[in-house]
C-alpha cells in the first residue's frame, strides 16, 4: 500500500534526511500478552482481530452494559489513543522528579528555541477540553447520570462531541507545526538528538490521531516519515517509532475495515514484518505484533499472509514462547491434504488413534466445557453428526483441566464421541500435547478426514459442517 509524497510533509523531512543522527532503541513495551488464555481463546477480539495498542474508531459514544447511551457514557467518550502508545518518554517526562523529591529550579527556555517548542507542545497537550472542566464538578456516581438520554440530550452531546473532536484536530495541527519547527532546528546537531526524538514522537502521535480520524494527508505523511527517518538513521529511536506508528495505523484500520477490506489486514501483516526485520533487538515488541498480525490474517481468511508472519517468528524468534506456538500453528495450517497423525489416551482409559478409522470420515473436534463458542455451536454439531453417523466418526480432543467437568458435560449433553483426555494435569488445558503440537488456539477447532485418513477440511464450524461432510464424502460414494 503506497501513497504519493506530500509536499507539506516532504518539505520539512528533506531537511533531516541528509544528516545522520544517533539514538538508542526504545524501552520495550508489551502491546499484548500472547500467552494470556483469554487471548488464546480469542475472547477479546473484534471481528477476529486481537486487540492491540490502538482501539477501534472513536464514535464518541461509550455504551453501558445495557447498551443504552447515558449521560455518563456520553461525557466520557474515549480518546483515539491510549496512554503510553509508543513506550517512550519525552525529555520533560524523563526529568520529572519523584513526588518526594524537591523539584529543581527550571531554566526558562528562550522563545523559539527547541526546548521552548517542546514546552509549547506540552502546553497545548495539557489544555483542558470543554467538558473536562464541567465533569470535574459533577459526580460520576449520580444515579441521574445513568438514566438514558432523551433524543434532545443525545443530539446535544453529539454536537459537543463533534466540537471536542474539532478542538483536538486543531490542536494536533498546532503540535505538528511546532514539532516540524523543532526538527528543523535540531536535525543538524547530534547533541540535540534527544530533543529531535521527542519532537518526532509528538509529530507522529499527532499525525496518527489525525490519520485515525480519516485525514488522508496525515496517512500519507506517516508513510513518508517512516521512509525518511529510516534513511536518516536506520537504528534510531525516530526510525523505530515511525515504523511502529505505521504498524498501529494498519492495525487500527484492520480492526475497522478488515472484514470488508482485506488490504488493511495485509498491510498490518506487512508493517509488522517490516518492523520485526528492521529492529530485531525490539523482540519484546515485534514478536507480539507479528503474532497478532498472523492471527488477524488467519482468522479472516488470509492464510498465506498468516503463514508468512508465523514463518518469520519461527525463523527469527524460535526460542520465544511465541516461536514455539508459531511452529505448531504452521503445522496446523499445512495439514490440508496430509495424512493426520493423531492419537492419545481416552477418558475411559483406552488409547485412541485416528488411523484405526480408515474407511469412514473422521471429524476431530477440539473443545472445552467452558468455551462458549463451542457450547453455542454444539446443538447444530450434534444434529449434523447424528444425521451422518453412518458415514462419519467423531473424536473429541478435550481441553478442560478438570476431569469431573468433562464427565458431567458429556453426560448432560449426551455426547457419544470418543474423547481424548490426558490423565496428567500438566498435559491438560492448553498444555495438551496435541493442541500444542498443532498450535490450536480457538475452540471449537474442527478438522475433517476423508475415508483415506487425509485431512480434507480445517476451516469448519457449525454453519458449514454439513455441506463439507457431503462435499468430502461424495467422491467416495460414487466410487462405491
Image (spheres, helix red, strand yellow):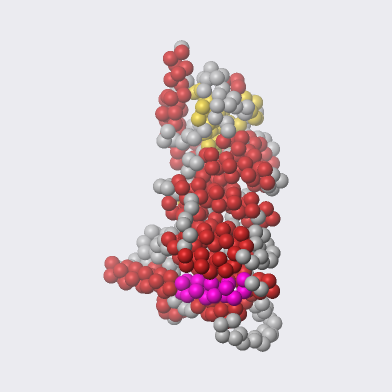
Residue lying at the far left of the rendered structure: 152
In reply to whether residue 298 is colored magenta, the answer given is no
Q: Which residues are magenta?
A: 171-187
Residue lying at the far front of the rendered structure: 18
Residue lying at the far top of the rendered structure: 480
Q: Position of residue 375 (x, y in %)?
A: 48, 40
Q: Which residue occupies 65% across, 59% down?
A: 234
Quick check: 166 above or below 385? below
**Is the magenta region chiefly helix, strand or loop?**
helix
Quick check: 13 above or below 46? below
Quick check: 406 above or below 255? above
Front residue of 181/50: it is 181
Q: Is residue 92 left or right of residue 264?
A: right
Q: Position of residue 117 (x, y in %)?
A: 56, 79
Q: Is residue 18 left or right of residue 466?
A: right
Front residue of 198/302: it is 198
Residue 459 appearing in the image: yes
Q: Position of residue 90 (x, y in %)?
A: 62, 72
Q: Is residue 133 left or right of residue 281?
A: left
Q: How many dots with numbers?
A: 0
Q: Which residue occupies 52% across, 75% down?
A: 178
Q: Which residue occupies 45% across, 18% down?
A: 475
Residue lying at the far right of the rendered structure: 319
Front residue of 86/233: it is 233
Amino acid at each position: 500500500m503506497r501513497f504519493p509524497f506530500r509536499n507539506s510533509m516532504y518539505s520539512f523531512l528533506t531537511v533531516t534526511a541528509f544528516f545522520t543522527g544517533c539514538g538508542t532503541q526504545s524501552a520495550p513495551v508489551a502491546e499484548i500478552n500472547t500467552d494470556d488464555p483469554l487471548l488464546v481463546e480469542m475472547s477479546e477480539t473484534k471481528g477476529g482481530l486481537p486487540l492491540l495498542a490502538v482501539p477501534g474508531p472513536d464514535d464518541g459514544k461509550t455504551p453501558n452494559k445495557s447498551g443504552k447511551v447515558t449521560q455518563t457514557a456520553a461525557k466520557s467518550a474515549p480518546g483515539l489513543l491510549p496512554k503510553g502508545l509508543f513506550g517512550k518518554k519525552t525529555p520533560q517526562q524523563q526529568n520529572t522528579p519523584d513526588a518526594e523529591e524537591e523539584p529543581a529550579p527550571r531554566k526558562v527556555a528562550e522563545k523559539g528555541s527547541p526546548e521552548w517548542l517542546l514546552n509549547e507542545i506540552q502546553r497545548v497537550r495539557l489544555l483542558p477540553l470543554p467538558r473536562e472542566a464541567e465533569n470535574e464538578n459533577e459526580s460520576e456516581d449520580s444515579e441521574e447520570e445513568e438514566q438514558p438520554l432523551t433524543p434532545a440530550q443525545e443530539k446535544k452531546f453529539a454536537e459537543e462531541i463533534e466540537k471536542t473532536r474539532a478542538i483536538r484536530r486543531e490542536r494536533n495541527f498546532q503540535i505538528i507545526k511546532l514539532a516540524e519547527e523543532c526538527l528543523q532546528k535540531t536535525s543538524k546537531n547530534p547533541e540535540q538528538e534527544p530533543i529531535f526524538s521527542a519532537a518526532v514522537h509528538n509529530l507522529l502521535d499527532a499525525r496518527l490521531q489525525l490519520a485515525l480520524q480519516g485525514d488522508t494527508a496525515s496517512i500519507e505523511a506517516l508513510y513518508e516519515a517512516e521512509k525518511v527517518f529510516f534513511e536518516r538513521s536506520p537504528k534510531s529511536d525516530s526510525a523505530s517509532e515511525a515504523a511502529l506508528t505505521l504498524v498501529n495505523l494498519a492495525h487500527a484500520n484492520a480492526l475497522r475495515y478488515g472484514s470488508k477490506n482485506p488490504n488493511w489486514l495485509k498491510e498490518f501483516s506487512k508493517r509488522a514484518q517490516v518492523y520485526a526485520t528492521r529492529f530485531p533487538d525490539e523482540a519484546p515488541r515485534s514478536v507480539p505484533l507479528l503474532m497478532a498480525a498472523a492471527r488477524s490474517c488467519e482468522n479472516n481468511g488470509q492464510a498465506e499472509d498468516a503463514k508468512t508472519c508465523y514463518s518469520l517468528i519461527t525463523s527469527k524468534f524460535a526460542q520465544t514462547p511465541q516461536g514455539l506456538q508459531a511452529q505448531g500453528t504452521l503445522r496446523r495450517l499445512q495439514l490440508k491434504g496430509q495424512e493426520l497423525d493423531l492419537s492419545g489416551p481416552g477418558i475411559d482409559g483406552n488409547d485412541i488413534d485416528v488411523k484405526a478409522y480408515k474407511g469412514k470420515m473422521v471429524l476431530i473436534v477440539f473443545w472445552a466445557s467452558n468455551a462458549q463458542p463451542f457450547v453455542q455451536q454444539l446443538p447444530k454439531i450434534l444434529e449434523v453428526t447424528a444425521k451422518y453417523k453412518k458415514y462419519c466418526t467423531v473424536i473429541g480432543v478435550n481441553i478442560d483441566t478438570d476431569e469431573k467437568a468433562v464427565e458431567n458435560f458429556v453426560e448432560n449433553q449426551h455426547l457419544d464421541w470418543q474423547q481424548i483426555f490426558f490423565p496428567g494435569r500438566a498435559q491438560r488445558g492448553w498444555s495438551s500435547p496435541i493442541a500444542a503440537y498443532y498450535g490450536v488456539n480457538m475452540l471449537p477447532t474442527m478438522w475433517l478426514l476423508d475415508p483415506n485418513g487425509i485431512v480434507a477440511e480445517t476451516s469448519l464450524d457449525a454453519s458449514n459442517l454439513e455441506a463439507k461432510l457431503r462435499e468430502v464424502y461424495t467422491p467416495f460414494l460414487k466410487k462405491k
